[in-house]
Image (tube, helix red, strand yellow):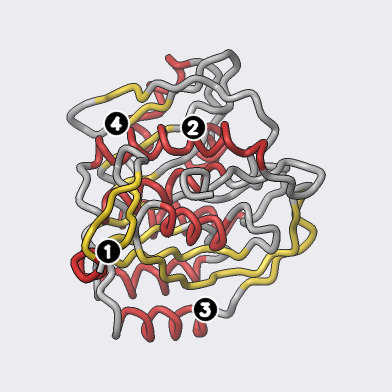
Amino acid sequence: MKCFRLGSSGQFKTTNAMTTSSAVPNVLTIAGSDPSGGAGIQADLKTFSALGAYGTSVITALTAQNTRGVSAVHAVPPDFIAAQLDALLDDVDVAAAKIGMVASREVALVIREALEKRRPRWIVLDPVMVAKSGDVLVDEAGIRAVREELVPLADLITPNLPEAAVLLDGPAAETPTAMEALVPGLLGLGTHHVLIKGGHLRGEHCHDLLASSEERQWIEGKRVATDNLHGTGCTLSSAITAYLARGRSLNEAVRQAKAWLGQALHASERLSVGRGHGPVHHFHAWW
């Protein structure tokens, strides 16, 4: 039996269905829900599916939001988050996990305990603190919990410039040189690698900085002229997670995820979702 699979280049490849199903990695997103489908759990699952990984999810918060902003956040009780994690990880072998919105210290501790007990090969942390609209999603206690409990757990963190400033309790970087100056402080929080996203800088380019204690690499990119930016951070971190689960090196996963996101941004004009910042087109290679 034959089926079609999306290769790493974005091209469709014909493969044996039984071989494909046995090779598909399971990935996990631990994040908040977005009813508009552009960010959070919904964006993560779309990304996993588009990139050839089987997505599972644990919901940490319900949000009332659309493409124009967030009007309410309802945190899921920590004991129920623990129940979701226990039920899933007792049964499913997870190759890589992505952590998104964490609203409290109690939730951070629950996540840390569950992932330390049954640690996936890769853990990616997207420190979601501020929505694209500017709405603050996490209180001060939640910020401290992300900084102290989850950053040291992660193999990679993916802050944008405002999020990096919050993690370090300092000003947001406004130049590439200032971005480089953030690296020691972010690595000093305990993570192995950091991807500082430069999308908030001005100019036609949109370069990100991938760094560890051994090296620094600029991941180059050209800014896409679109207002459809809702969920770009969630989508990028999920794409990296999917590629890592499929066996890519960290460097390859970051570069391929950034290139794929660029294509999704270019194709976003084919969608018509809401009257604010619309979503990227996660299935641009399929539809």
Near mark 4 (Cα within 10 A), the count class, few <14, some 14-19 or many ≥20, is: many
State the image coordinates of residue 196 (x, y, percent, origin top left).
42, 32
Query: Which residue type carries mark 1?
Result: Lys
Distance from the alpha carbon under mark 3 to that under mark 2: 36 Å
Of the image marks 2 and 4, the number of the one nearer the N terminus: 4
Distance from the alpha carbon under mark 3 to that under mark 1: 44 Å
* Disc marking residue 2: 1
Q: Is residue 200 left or right of residue 10?
A: right
Secondary structure at badge 3 equals helix
Residue drawn at 76 percent across, 63 percent down? 72
Q: Is residue 225 visible?
A: yes
Residue drawn at 75 percent across, 64 percent down? 64
Query: Which residue type carries mark 3?
Result: Pro
Distance from the alpha carbon under mark 2 to that under mark 4: 21 Å
Distance from the alpha carbon under mark 3 to that under mark 4: 33 Å
**Label 3 vs label 1, nearer the camera:** 1
Residue topped by disc 2: 262
* Disc marking residue 78: 3
Residue topped by disc 4: 211
Image quadrant of residue 84?
A: bottom left
Of the image marks 3 and 4, the number of the one nearer the N terminus: 3
Q: Is residue 168 visible?
A: no
* Disc marking residue 66: none
